[in-house]
Image (cartoon, grey):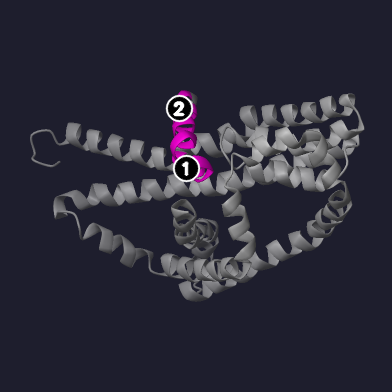
Amino acid sequence: MSDIKFFRLMFPFLLALVITYLARRPVKALEKRRVSRSLSIIIVYFILIAVVTVLLILVLPRIVGNIREIIPEVPQIYEKYSDVIDMVLGLFSKESAIKVLENSVSILFDMFLSFILAFYMIRDKEIISDFILSFFPVQWRKEVLAEIHEISRIISGFVTGQLLVAVLVGALETVGLMIIGVKYPFVMGFIGGAANIIPVIGPFIGAIPAILVALMESPYKALFAAGVFLIVQQIDNNFLTPRIVEGRLGLHPIVTLSVVSIAALFWGIGGVLLSLPFTAVIVSVIKRIYSVKVKNKGNGIF
């Protein structure tokens, strides 16, 4: 229960970070055109909401149509593959899933709160930086400010990169499933793309529903469905994630696998999601401290 409360507490702040890193570059571009920062943020918010709305209008009806088609078959699918489904559901907190459904109004409020928090995080970024710097001695502040910018770059790269990769992976999986004729390709592609946000284990979780649905028709179609996810995952592992996400984090694959495994063992899915950017930030801070120590050896700094 404490994990659920912690997630509920952190959700508005985490979503605010996502919104901040999605909006800050367009805001900066508008500021260069002499638009005030507050007005720039509001304009970017409207554009962001409009883009999301258009995407929902284009994609949501197909996803809803797929869901309507799949609902009558859920009991049959569950009856046939109950062991596998229970195993996958066991990776998540069932209590957490129920709470999310029960508190949908609260979640909408949290999302609204996130936009408000992001507004002030973008508008008052200099004030926030100055506040953080005030905790450090004057001789450290130049390096601390440089590290704040580096941490911002790491988190920004991770957030925007993960979202972009998830969209690309979901689109590729949807197209692949449509080509081989698997039922409900939009729902299955959406699940695959969303699950891909979870490092390492996400792609396997995302593939299971599509493979089970395909298996209801024939083992061969299930094999083809598995092949689609395998091919897309190879494209992701070799081209998308290394260029869009991992390059910005600067973590070796061995470190990535180790961190994700430890996070999954102790903190579950939430820990897995946050483990990589957190580790990248810690590594960056350690590198900064070491480089400053070497550069200022004997000067009394650090």
Closest to the observer, 102 or 185: 102
The mark nearer the N terminus, 1 or 2, is 2
Asked if residue 4 is positioned above or below residue 217 in the image, the reply reads below
Q: Amino acid at mark 2?
A: Ser
* Count of all numbered marks drawn on residues in the image: 2
Q: Look at the numbered disc 1 and give the secondary structure of its residue.
A: helix
Q: Which residue is mark 1?
A: 271
What's the CA distance linking mark 1 and mark 2?
A: 13 Å
In the visual, does 266 lie left or right of 107? left
Disc 2 marks which residue? 258
Q: Which of the two residues, 84 or 154, is positioned nearer the viewer here?
A: 84
- Membership of 183 in magenta stretch: no
Q: Position of residue 77 (x, y in %)?
A: 83, 40
Residue drawn at point x = 26 percent, y = 63 percent? 131
For label 1, count other residues whose C-alpha is less than 10 Å away and answer few (under 14), some (14-19) or many (20+): some
Residue 143 at x, y = what percent?
25, 47
Residue 76, picture quadrant: top right
Q: Going 56% across and 66% down the picture, which residue do you hit?
A: 111
Q: Is residue 93 above or below residue 217?
A: below
Q: Position of residue 223 (x, y in %)?
A: 83, 25
Give the residues in magenta. Answer: 254-275
